[in-house]
Image: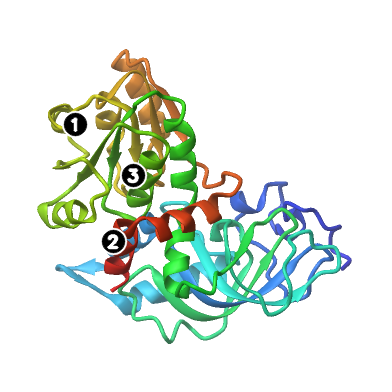
Amino acid sequence: MTVRDADPTGLHRVLDDTVVLPQAAARLDTRRELWPDEVRIRVERLNLDAASFRQLERAHTVQGHVDRDALRAEVLDIVATRGKMQNPETGSGGMLVGVVEEVGPASPLGLRVGDRVTTLVSLTLTPLVIEDGLAGWDGHDEQVPCDGYAVLFGRSIAAVIPDDLPAALSLSVMDVCGAPALTARVVSGYADATVAVIGGGGKSGSLSLAAARQAGARHLIGIVPHEEEAARLRASGLADEVVVADARNPVALREAVEKAGGPADVTVVCVDVPGCEGGAILATADRGTVVFFSMATSFSAAALGAEGLAADVTMLVGNGYVPGHAAYALQLLREYDGVRSLFESRLA
């Protein structure tokens, strides 16, 4: 390699004129040849970020009908143009499952050729090439079967997929594995906490409820947008109270949480729609903590909203990484039948 010396953050793959990290880059170098600390993955499946997929659906909806061919074509165009999957509207990407096909001699990741892995870093910073035109994807959900390759850097993170779980299920869990780990860490700092999870019936939400329970929460409140999802969450047994509320309506959300036993010491935001910042703040007690795991969150709205409401709350950005997060999320899936049932119903 003569272009640039290897950098563990992947700077050598950035093709921009200015020096930026791969996540902020407009385009990445996707050559197959590896720098010494890199790993190349033969991609089997992408898992698009939920906020990104919903935005793509909205962008290609005409008279109530989603043009799935146009949606698929846009994903292909994004990857071909940018050398990675990063939705230009949401800024988010997702993750992937594949098989290790080559390991650079200086790679610190501990992977071996033939390992079936899921990446625990975002597609927004992962060099990616799709070689089959997404011929096997109908565009109806976030999980995208495909053939191609991706490159991991020296500071990337990947986990070998366990043999006891289907690959699609493992991918769904690891896509959101940062949420339960950080939730558990925050909840463990409170005695007998009341925890509200906005989007408690979803992937990150159900795992966060289980994590809060395991971390010693006294009272769990799950907030969902409609009764059908509420019925599923009640059946899972993960929450003590399940309420239906529009998280974009701050007053309605505050009142729903208070009636269910709030305000919350910890509020976890796991929904992929904008406009939930004010309600999350109002639903949280003084000296409480709000954890934002949604890529649809406006962090300026959250900061200015808390200031304007004179809310004495700590606000955290869930960055998707906590040491041991993948193993912990899979442990919750195995130990809580309600979590697994919700994940499997979504896959079905």
- First in sequence: mark 2 or mark 1? 1
Marks 3 and 2, Cα distance to the nearest angstrom?
A: 12 Å
Image quarter hosting the N terminus: bottom right
**On the image, numbered disc 1 is attached to which residue?**
257
Residue drawn where x is 35% and y is 37% of the image: 268
Is residue 60 at all visible to an observer of this figure?
no
Residue 277 higher or lower than 54, as above or below: above
Kind of residue indicated by mark 3: Leu
| SS for callout 3 | helix
**On the image, numbered disc 3 is attached to which residue?**
209
- First in sequence: mark 1 or mark 3? 3
| SS for callout 1 | helix
* Residue 29 position within the rendered picture, expressed as x and y whole percent measured from the top left: 70, 66
**On the image, numbered disc 2 is attached to which residue?**
342
* Residue 230 position within the rendered picture, expressed as x and y whole percent measured from the top left: 16, 51
Residue drawn where x is 30% and y is 54% of the image: 202
- First in sequence: mark 3 or mark 2? 3
Residue drawn where x is 27% and y is 29% of the image: 278
Image quarter hosting the C terminus: bottom left
Kind of residue indicated by mark 2: Leu
Marks 2 and 1, Cα distance to the nearest angstrom?
A: 22 Å
Callout 2 touching callout 1 (CB < 8 Å): no
